[in-house]
Image (cartoon, rainbow, N blue to C red):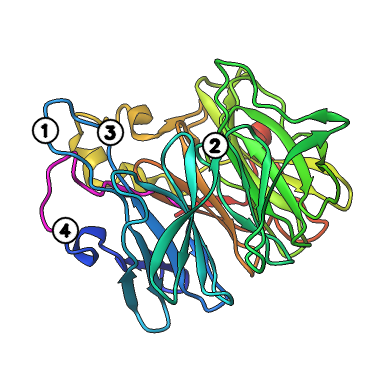
Amino acid sequence: MEFDPTTEKQRTVIDTHSLCGLGVTSHNEAQSKIHTHNFVGPSGKIYVGSMNAPVEKDDPSKYPGGYVMTYDPKTGVAENLGMPYPGIGVLDVVADEGRGIIYVVPSRNPSPWMLYDMNIRAYRELGPNLIIWSTTLIDRRGYANALTENFELARYDPGSGEIVVRSINVGGKKLRKPDPPVEWVPKWKLAKDRRTAYLIHLQDATLYAIDLLSEGDVVQAKDQGKLIDGRDVDIRSPLSIDSEGRAYTVIRIDNETGFGEGMLHHLVRFDPQSEKMEDLGVLAVKNPGFYFDSPDAKLGHPVFGSAEDPSYYGYHKLPDGTLTPLHTCHAVCVTRDGTIYVTILYPFTLLKIEGVTEKGKRTSNIELGIPAGLSGI
């Protein structure tokens, strides 16, 4: 979907089944979703990939594999770049437009690291195997970086074709995946200096700063501390970097305030200059009518609930009537003008947050640290 912040209108720019000529398919064959980040190249072109749905046991059909696709906002043209890996969906797509190559991570555990050559329009495996949900970062040298199945750093030099795999050291110790039942889903973002990678994961609010330009046998990283304290940490959204180089994300934790129940979603920020964390407050929707006036809320829905019980619909009320997200935040993006956009999974909602990115400014808080400047579209 394309959202115009000026007109507040949205429209579909890629219909995967139509673009890839798939027509009507059964459940197991269908391209169910685009689960990649929207990678935007210097040209402005957007790169994404498609995935499958959970398997229906009574459906004998098989998933053919995901597709890599692009959309150019300048021309309005979408393009299908084919299927990187038969039978497997696509989790990450990152383009190096200057060199004419695209890095792809399929949705398998472990995942093969793949490269698409734009000139010959063909895919090939790079190796080594990556951890599930790994994504590619291109540092300021033009090297591609990804996390392996052993949670080491793989670096690919597109000039020489050399791949180097090294351990990541934090305070003299190797960075390791946590023990079960904690699930490791890495999420990282290239810092403004294009040499530092900020890393978090699904169930731990610890922020690591990895020096991608480290020399020697190991890659050096620093434990920056926890972005927030709380129980049952859940971080589904990636990090986003503002013009000052500060890193943002939304973290869901249990509501232990004594004011209401359920979970609360906090907007948090790390400032690399001060090396301090900031809890900017809980997401609160200023115009709850967007939900309560919707057809599903008025009529009721067997899955999503109704206006009388909105919790199944991804939101819940605090005792003072404040509507706040309950289940899952899947994306955070800080724009050039400092506006922050957040998406909530269902109903698929775009939240607009203003007034928190100005240097040295923090929004005034009301009860429970809910910033008055947090608003919902």
Three-letter amino acid code at disc 3? Pro
Secondary structure type for disc 2? loop
Specify which label sits upstream in the sequence, 3 or 4: 4
Residue nearer the viewer, 224 or 376: 224
Secondary structure type for disc 4? loop
Specify which label sits upstream in the sequence, 4 or 2: 4
Rendered image: mark on residue 22 = 4
Secondary structure type for disc 3? loop
Q: Which residue is mark 2?
A: 131
Residue nearer the viewer, 304 or 215: 215
| In this view, 54 is above or below 21 | above
Specify which label sits upstream in the sequence, 2 or 1: 1
| In this view, 76 is above or below 237 | below
Q: Which residue is mark 3?
A: 54
| In this view, 116 is above or below 341 | below
Residue stretch in magenta: 22-37
Asked whether residue 227 appears in the rendered view, the answer is no
Secondary structure type for disc 1? loop
Q: Nearer the viewer's eye, disc 4 or disc 2?
A: 2
Q: Please identify the residue farthest to the bottom as the structure is shown.
A: 75
